[in-house]
Image (cartoon, grey):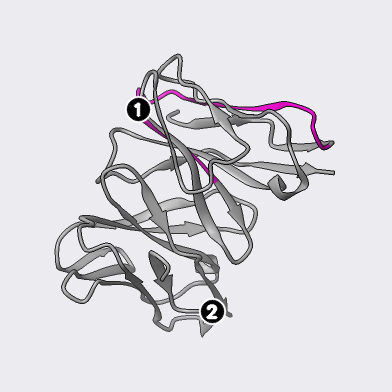
Amino acid sequence: QKEVEQNSGPLSVPEGAIASLNCTYSDRVSQSFFWYRQYSGKSPELIMSIYSNGDKEDGRFTAQLNKASQYVSLLIRDSQPSDSATYLCAFSNDYKLSFGAGTTVTVRA
Amino acid sequence: EAQVTQNPRYLITVTGKKLTVTCSQNMNHEYMSWYRQDPGLGLRQIYYSMNVEVTDKGDVPEGYKVSRKEKRNFPLILESPSPNQTSLYFCASSPRQGGYGYTFGSGTRLTVV
């Protein structure tokens, strides 16, 4: 079993819609969770971090964490063409950050 | 500007010719790490360092070496590169291990022929 599983893409959404990304993880002791955005040919960029159960909102992004279900999600509201990228979820234990393979999102104008 | 600087950005080399990819950060971060990114496999950790002179293997360390003689620098060494090491490499740093997001360098695209 992979440490981090993301919903398979690609995901295509119309401009203005909500994009929903999901991620499950296998390490029960993980305490820190992250979402990164990676544009084609660029390096990953941290967009959200979440440490406790519940929702965390930052602008158009909302991260949701459920440790009991080992599940973390990212919602992108009012999707814009500039949101077209690959989104990587990651979790941290004491010594490393483990990444999912990523979900590619395309926002159609 | 706070950043992680990798060099070179692109590198084409031949099998067996030793190479070094440099990584430097100016944020006084304790923790540094190297990842490789391959299609369908995501980011996989090669080596990490928790502080000066403290390094350890990640998930895919075979064929790589690292050193951490200074806090800011964490070079990746391929002593005898092979074609299966063709990949996109990222260096990253974090204030401390665990619980913090990483800042990534711009990446090095390595091709071994």
Q: Is residue B92 left or right of residue B100?
A: right
Label ID, residue A9: 2
Residue B58: x %, y % from top left = 45, 43
Report the amino acid beneath label 1: His
> Is B62 or A39 nearer to us in this picture?
B62
> Is A97 or B78 nearer to us in this picture?
B78
What crowding class fits label 1: few (fewer than 14 Cα within 10 Å), some (14-19), or many (20 or more)?
Answer: some
Please name the residue that numbered disc 1 is placed on.
B29
Looking at this rendering, what residue extends furthest in the top direction? B69
Which span of residues is magenta-colored?
A: B15-35
Q: Is residue B38 left or right of residue A67?
A: right
Looking at this rendering, what residue extends furthest in the front direction? B62
Q: Is residue A5 left or right of residue B87?
A: left
Query: For the residue labelled by badge 2, is the local secondary structure a helix, a strand or a loop?
Result: loop
Quarter the N terminus of chain B occupies:
top left
Residue A79: x %, y % from top left = 45, 75
Count of numbered badges drawn on the protein: 2
Report the amino acid beneath label 2: Gly
Q: Is residue A5 magenta?
A: no
- Label 2 to label 1: alpha-carbon separation: 34 Å
